[in-house]
């Protein structure tokens, strides 16, 4: 940081990074007469650690143009007019950075306006008002559906589209692009295939996919933040097509990533692989958590407990719930014809999570990195079919994966 920090009076302000009592204030914020609660820090260490994200508050309301090639420089300024910060699970917006006891270096950035869906696209019942009607009250929240051959055919087709959409997103992941640009690719690819991006307006979620960077565990909202060299980013895609949903996600490297992050991402990939290998009729759903936890803990990582895999089909989320951690209480056994997701979230530090003021973004409680992978699966008579499996045309982004 250039220059020193001015002392903060004893006003009860908290450090914007760690939440401890604040004793310092950013001198640039003082000069610009910005709100004191967004400029307070407990120490020089917290100030330095927050600088890459904090400096964005010093900028005006429009981005510099043309944008510099260096992504950290581009992250200095907010985007164009009409972009605002998300609050209340997507139901409100604000022009100010929300106040929060941030657990790591990431901060939210403004989000763009809701993307347009043409009238000819078949839309789920939450598309207009953000409220699912059929899903919450369905019997399939308690009974695991056995899909008909016709339903399975539609799910295969939808999963193929969802895989191609995710692959399109993977191809543009690199330093210098925003997660909003990833969302735009996901949205356009989904619409072009005749599908609807299931997350869009689901319980008011404001975007067409989830993008979870670094310490974000899941449900990250695509925004104006620019991906930087060394980041990791999970892109979570769900497509609604011909009356059924398909759900999958992968975590990608952004440029040159440190070895610790590589180990985390590879371990998470392997956790899902090992769980899938055990799927077959007669296996208890709770066994998935034992398999995943065993592999994660052997590698020195922890398993998130707040989110789980789920049934999927004509409903986005339904029975069964499939926890990813050991000694879980999931009930039921697998039967041929069931479709569900397995989607372990593995943390490099503690398993606990916190939620940002937007009501969606789940982050690690200690600010350390998290990774996730997900597939939609069909239990067959003899084992499992990975409906969302990678294709020969899928980008080769995981060095350890089979060609």
Image: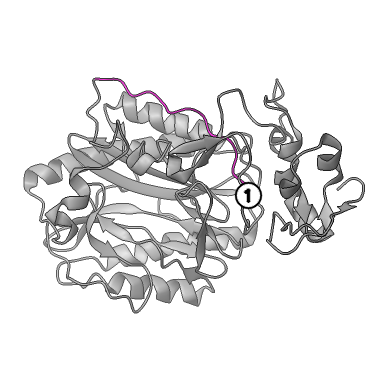
Q: Could you tell me which residue is drawn at 71 percent across and 30 percent down?
A: 69
Residue 53: image quadrant is top right
Residue 296 on the magenta segment? no
Label 1 packing within 10 angstroms: few (<14), some (14-19), many (20+):
few
To which residue does mark 1 refer? 99
61 lies left or right of 186: right
Q: Position of residue 56 (x, y in %)?
A: 71, 38
Choose between 57 and 319: the one closer to the eye: 57
Q: Nearer the viewer, residue 50 or 390?
A: 50
Residue 238, percent from left and from top = 33, 42
Tell me: 310 left or right of 371: left
Q: Position of residue 358 (x, y in %)?
A: 50, 46
Q: How is the image coloured?
A: one colour
Residue 372 in sight in this render = yes
Please tell me whether residue 110 belongs to the stretch shown in magenta.
yes
Above or below: residue 391 compared with residue 272: above
Residue 18: horizontal and vertical position, in percent?
68, 61
- Image position of 279 (left or right of 86): left
**Can residue 392 be seen by looking at this rendering?**
no
Magenta segment: 107-119
Give the prevailing secondary structure in the magenta stretch.
loop
Q: Does residue 285 appear left or right of residue 144 in this picture? A: right
């Amino acid at each position: 940081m250039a220059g020193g920090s001015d002392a903060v009076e004893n006003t009860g302000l908290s450090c914007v990074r760690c939440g401890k009592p604040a004793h310092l204030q950013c001198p640039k914020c003082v000069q610009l007469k910005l709100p004191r609660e967004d400029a307070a820090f407990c120490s020089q260490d917290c100030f330095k650690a927050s600088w890459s994200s904090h400096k964005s508050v010093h900028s005006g309301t429009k981005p510099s143009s043309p944008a510099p090639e260096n992504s950290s420089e581009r992250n200095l300024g907010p985007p164009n007019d009409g972009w605002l910060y998300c609050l209340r699970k997507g139901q409100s917006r604000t022009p100010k950075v929300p106040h929060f006891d941030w657990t790591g270096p990431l901060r939210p950035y403004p989000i763009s306006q809701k993307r347009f869906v043409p009238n000819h696209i078949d839309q789920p019942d939450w598309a207009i008002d953000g409220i699912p009607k059929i899903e919450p009250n369905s019997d399939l929240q308690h009974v695991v559906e056995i899909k008909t051959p016709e339903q399975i055919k539609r799910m295969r087709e939808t999963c193929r589209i969802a895989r191609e959409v995710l692959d399109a997103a993977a191809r543009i992941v690199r330093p210098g692009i925003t997660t909003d640009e990833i969302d735009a690719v996901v949205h356009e690819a989904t619409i072009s295939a005749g599908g609807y991006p299931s997350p869009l307006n689901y319980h008011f979620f404001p975007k067409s996919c989830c993008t979870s960077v670094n310490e974000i565990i899941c449900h990250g909202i695509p925004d104006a933040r620019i991906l930087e060299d060394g980041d990791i980013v999970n892109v979570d895609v769900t497509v609604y097509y011909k009356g059924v949903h398909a759900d999958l996600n992968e975590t990608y490297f952004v440029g040159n990533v440190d070895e610790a992050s590589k180990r985390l991402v590879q371990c998470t990939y392997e956790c899902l692989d090992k769980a899938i290998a055990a799927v077959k009729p007669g296996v208890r759903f709770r066994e998935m958590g034992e398999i995943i936890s065993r592999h994660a803990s052997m590698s020195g990582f922890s398993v998130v407990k707040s989110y789980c895999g789920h049934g999927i089909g004509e409903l986005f989320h339904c029975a069964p719930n499939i926890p990813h951690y050991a000694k879980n209480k999931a009930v039921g056994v697998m039967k041929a014809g069931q479709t569900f997701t397995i989607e372990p979230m593995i943390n490099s530090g503690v398993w606990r999570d916190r939620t940002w003021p937007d009501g969606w973004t789940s982050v690690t409680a200690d600010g350390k990195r998290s990774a996730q992978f997900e597939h939609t699966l069909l239990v067959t008579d003899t084992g499992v079919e990975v409906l969302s499996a990678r294709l020969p045309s899928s980008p080769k982004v995981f060095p350890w994966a089979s060609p």
